[in-house]
Image: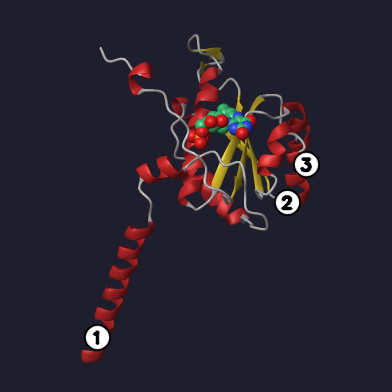
Amino acid sequence: MRIKALFGALVALSVFAACTAEQATTPSLDDLFLTRRSIRAYEPGRTISEAQVRELLTATQNAPSWANQQPSKYYVAITPEKHDAVLEMIGGNKDRVVNAPVMIVSTFEKGKSGFFRGNPANDAGDFWGAYDNGLSNAYLVLKAREMGFDTLIMGMRESDKLRELFNIPEEEMILAVIALGYRAEEPNMPVHRPLDEVVKFF
Ligand SMILES: Cc1cc2nc3c(=O)[nH]c(=O)nc-3n(C[C@H](O)[C@H](O)[C@H](O)COP(=O)(O)O)c2cc1C
């Protein structure tokens, strides 16, 4: 009986210790906002597994989207062959992300978000698809930081070549390529516009 009680106490203690350790190491949302930066130099020789990328992209599925249309799609270059091919399709960004082990192409299916029975619901039309893709990518870059990774969202890319490489249908608009890796240097905090320049209260 005494041994059982002792065992129970030990289990409770280890669960408590694990919870406390998690609390100490899990960054807050504000930490993620502060430490997530666009990284333009990555540690060479580091890898990221398919399972880790799956965990990352599963988190993006929590992002809101127009009428839950979920128009965002991702094409993940994880093999050396595809990774190196993408590097040739991102112009001057190549030198910045050459050591990031994973490249993720983000697209959205046109004619879904912002559309009702095939017609645009309002003046923003397919911009709503881009809106949803941006939201999804925001989840991606923040979750990446929580997982200890770093990212660079790249709008400078050759969409025609990417379309061919990944066989992306014309119904999808190709937006960003996102590099995923481990930072090799600490970035500077960019200058942010004064809040009152971009926000008006009425
Ligand atoms: C849609 C979009 C496209 C971008 N394209 C590039 C790019 O091609 N190359 C690059 O080095 N940074 C690119 N960036 C990163 C921005 O320059 C960066 O987010 C901005 O300077 C603010 O810095 P921060 O991300 O560290 O806060 C892009 C960011 C976004 C959101």
What label does residue 162 carry, if any?
A: none
Q: Please, which residue is most extreme toward the top here?
A: 123
Q: Position of residue 29 (x, y in %)?
A: 37, 44
Q: Reply above or below: 78 against 95.
A: below
Side of 30 relative to 164 (left or right): left
Look at the numbered disc 2 and give the secondary structure of its residue: loop
Q: Reply above or below: 190 against 122.
A: below
For badge 3, the amino acid type reads Ala
Label 3, residues with CA under 10 Å away: few <14, some 14-19, many ≥20: some
Camera-nearest residue between 67 and 100:
100
Q: Reply above or below: 114 against 42.
A: above
The residue tagged 2 is 79
Mark 2 to mark 1 CA distance (whole Å): 50 Å
| Colour setup of the view | secondary structure
The residue tagged 3 is 85
Mark 2 to mark 3 CA distance (whole Å): 10 Å
Residue 109 can be seen, yes or no: yes
Q: Reply above or below: 26 against 160.
A: below
Q: Quadrant of residue 88?
A: top right
The residue tagged 1 is 6
